[in-house]
């Protein structure tokens, strides 16, 4: 995926931090997925500052996806109603009659062209992931500090 190599956040630290995906508490913590600390950390603590900064970053991403999906929905509806070509040919979408549901042809696509099933992965976080999260928490609390962090 051409993800950059881990790098040092700020001198004098020597701990290299990998690029990560921002996640919520539903995801597993690992070296490439950061999730908030559990519970309600104490006001002004590095854990609480980390949770806020993680949430702030996730909000930016969620807004971008929300805008993209909203635009796609409008485009999708426009193409379905006004297109001179068959954007969704008859039978490609699920249909419902008075007595049955007729499944769309998209359901017959091969696995290589559709979403693959999610495999069951262990949920226990490794020490490396916890160390990365703690380092990020310390970084957020000391470098680029938010002045009002103790009120949050």
Image (spheres, helix red, strand yellow):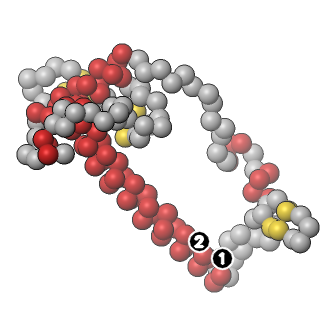
Seen at 37% across and 59% down, the residue is: 63
Extreme-right residue of the structure:
99
Q: Is residue 102 left or right of residue 3?
A: right
Q: Quadrant of the C terminus?
A: top left
Circles 1 and 2: CB distance less than 8 Å?
yes
Seen at 48% across and 68% down, the residue is: 70
- Regarding residue 95, the answer to whether it shows in the image is yes
Q: Relative to residue 112, is residue 69 depicted above or below?
A: below
Q: Is residue 81 left or right of residue 45?
A: right
Q: How many marks?
A: 2
Q: Position of residue 68 (x, y in %)?
A: 45, 63
- Regarding residue 144, the answer to whether it shows in the image is no
Residue 105 is tagged as: none
Seen at 41% across and 28% down, the residue is: 29
Q: Relative to residue 67, is residue 18 depicted above or below?
A: above
Q: Position of residue 10 (x, y in %)?
A: 13, 30
Q: Is residue 30 left or right of residue 99?
A: left
Q: Relative to residue 71, is residue 131 depicted above or below?
A: above
Instruction: Identify the image quadrant of residue 33.
Output: top left
Q: Nearer the viewer, residue 1 or 67?
A: 67
Instruction: Identify the image quadrant of residue 20.
Output: top left
> Within 10 angstroms of label 1, few (less than 14), some, or many (20 or more) residues?
some
Residue 80 is tagged as: 1
Q: Position of residue 25 (x, y in %)?
A: 42, 37
Mark 1: which secondary structure? helix
Q: Nearer the viewer, residue 144 or 25?
A: 25
Residue named by callout 2: 76
């Amino acid at each position: 995926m051409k993800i950059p190599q881990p790098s040092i956040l700020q001198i004098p630290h020597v701990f290299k931090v990998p690029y990560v995906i921002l996640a919520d508490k539903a995801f597993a913590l690992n070296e490439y997925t950061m999730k908030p600390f559990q519970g309600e950390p104490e006001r002004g603590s590095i854990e609480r500052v980390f949770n806020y900064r993680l949430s702030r970053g996730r909000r930016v991403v969620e807004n971008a996806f929300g805008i993209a999906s909203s635009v796609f929905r409008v485009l999708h509806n426009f193409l379905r109603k006004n297109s001179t070509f068959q954007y969704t040919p008859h039978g490609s979408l699920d249909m419902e009659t008075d007595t049955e549901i007729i499944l769309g042809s998209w359901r017959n696509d091969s696995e290589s062209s559709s979403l693959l099933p999610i495999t069951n992965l262990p949920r226990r976080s490794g020490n490396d992931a916890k160390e990365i999260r703690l380092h990020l928490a310390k970084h957020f609390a000391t470098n680029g500090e938010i002045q009002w962090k103790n009120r949050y």
